[in-house]
Image (spheres, helix red, strand yellow):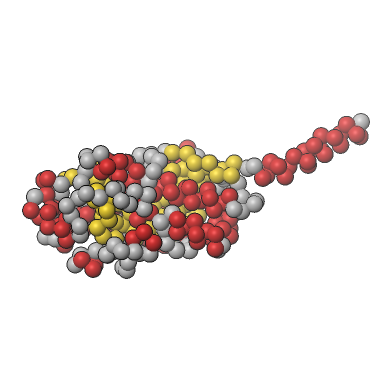
């Protein structure tokens, strides 16, 4: 009888390390494949693969509302899942600030880690007649009705805001511009390659997938100085007479009821992988730049970012009061 009792215990102990090694986790991408949200989860997946005790991360897609559908799904139905993380961007925070997530606030979820920072870009097809941001803005002043601008999201999205702020500096009313609302950066560039839009308001990370001979041409980066890598020769908007810098944080959050121990486990996991030289290379390949914030420090950053976005959005009467 004693042997019979011990055998199941020995079997359980023998399989425990294998079970831990193959623990599954999920990264929710709040957009269709191909955009920056996808790249964020992909970067998290690659980084965690290099950590022997980290879970295997699978990617799932839950597009809609630049993060709103994923937000409401987690907050209303999946609040305490200890192995579900969700990608976010500055665009998500802008929509949160404008009230597009309902009455939600930054304190409704748990902020895990920033994986890097991105910057806005303005791009056109490789065969476009416009070779600078000045060329494009001059064309928009002449006849804004002729130019279709692809953006991720709708009026008030971060892609819309970038063009609206540039238009205002060029003496244009943003309401004169013609936008095409798309879901994610992948759709933006597909639409541009098909000739459906003539301009894309996008971000460096997702644009890096589509630049090159015969593809997209970047007219300006919305950073305080020129970016290294594939955009090294692209002037900033400031160099071309438009004072606009648009940084975008990219990172990971979790549900509000995730146990403290599990939340800290994820914070520590990203803290560990982000400190390695290998991660710096992965981040650069994803078109992102360094921003090392985790846990409580990231939460403070998010609260301030949402407050800043709300002030910007109020310039265009875009904040929904609930």
On the picture, is 209 further left or further right than 24? left
Position of residue 9 measured from the top left corner of the image (x, y, whole percent): 81, 38
Position of residue 291 measured from the top left corner of the image (x, y, whole percent): 44, 63
| Residue in front for this viewpoint, 76 or 117 | 117
Position of residue 80 measured from the top left corner of the image (x, y, whole percent): 54, 43
Residue placed at 40% from the left, 41% from the top?
33
Q: How many marks?
A: 0
| Residue in front for this viewpoint, 266 or 136 | 136
Q: Image quarter for residue 70?
A: top left
Q: Residue furthest front?
A: 213
On the picture, is 295 further left or further right than 54? left
On the picture, is 300 further left or further right than 275? left
Residue placed at 92% from the left, 31% from the top?
1
On the picture, is 166 further left or further right than 4? left
Residue placed at 15% from the left, 47% from the top?
147
Q: Residue furthest left?
A: 142
| Location of residue 144 with respect to 11 vertically, above or below | below
Q: Is residue 152 visible?
A: no
Q: Is residue 177 visible?
A: yes
| Residue in front for this viewpoint, 249 or 46 | 46
Q: Image quarter for residue 231?
A: bottom left
Residue placed at 39% from the left, 43% from the top?
34
Position of residue 241 measured from the top left corner of the image (x, y, whole percent): 19, 67
Q: Image quarter for residue 161?
A: bottom left
């Amino acid at each position: 009888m004693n042997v019979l009792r011990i055998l199941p215990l020995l079997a359980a102990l023998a399989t425990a390390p294998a079970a831990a090694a193959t623990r599954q986790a999920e990264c929710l991408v709040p957009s269709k494949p191909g955009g920056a949200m996808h790249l964020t989860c992909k970067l998290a997946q690659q980084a965690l693969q290099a950590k022997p005790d980290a879970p295997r991360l699978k990617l799932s897609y839950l597009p809609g509302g630049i993060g709103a559908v994923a937000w409401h799904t987690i907050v209303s139905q999946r609040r305490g899942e200890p192995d579900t993380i969700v990608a976010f961007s500055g665009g998500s925070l802008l929509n949160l600030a404008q009230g597009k997530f309902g009455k939600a606030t930054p304190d409704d979820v748990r902020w895990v880690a920033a994986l890097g920072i991105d910057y806005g870009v303005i791009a056109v097809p490789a065969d476009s007649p416009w070779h600078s941001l000045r060329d494009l803005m001059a064309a928009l002043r002449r006849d804004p009705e002729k130019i279709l601008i692809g953006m991720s999201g709708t009026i008030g999205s971060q892609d819309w805001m970038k063009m609206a702020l540039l238009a205002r500096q060029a003496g244009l009313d943003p309401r004169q511009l013609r936008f095409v609302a798309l879901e994610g950066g992948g759709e933006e560039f597909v639409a541009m390659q098909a000739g459906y839009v003539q301009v894309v308001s996008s971000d460096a990370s997702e644009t890096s997938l589509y630049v090159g001979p015969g593809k997209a041409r970047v007219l300006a980066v919305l950073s305080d100085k020129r970016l290294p890598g594939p955009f090294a020769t692209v002037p900033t908007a400031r160099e071309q007479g438009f004072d606009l810098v648009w940084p975008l944080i990219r990172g990971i959050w979790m549900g509000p009821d995730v146990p403290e121990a599990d939340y800290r486990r994820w914070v520590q996991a990203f803290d560990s992988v982000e400190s390695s030289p290998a991660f710096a290379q992965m981040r650069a390949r994803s078109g992102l730049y360094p921003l090392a914030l985790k846990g409580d420090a990231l939460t403070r950053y998010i609260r301030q970012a949402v407050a800043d976005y709300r002030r910007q959005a109020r310039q265009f009467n875009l904040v929904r009061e609930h």
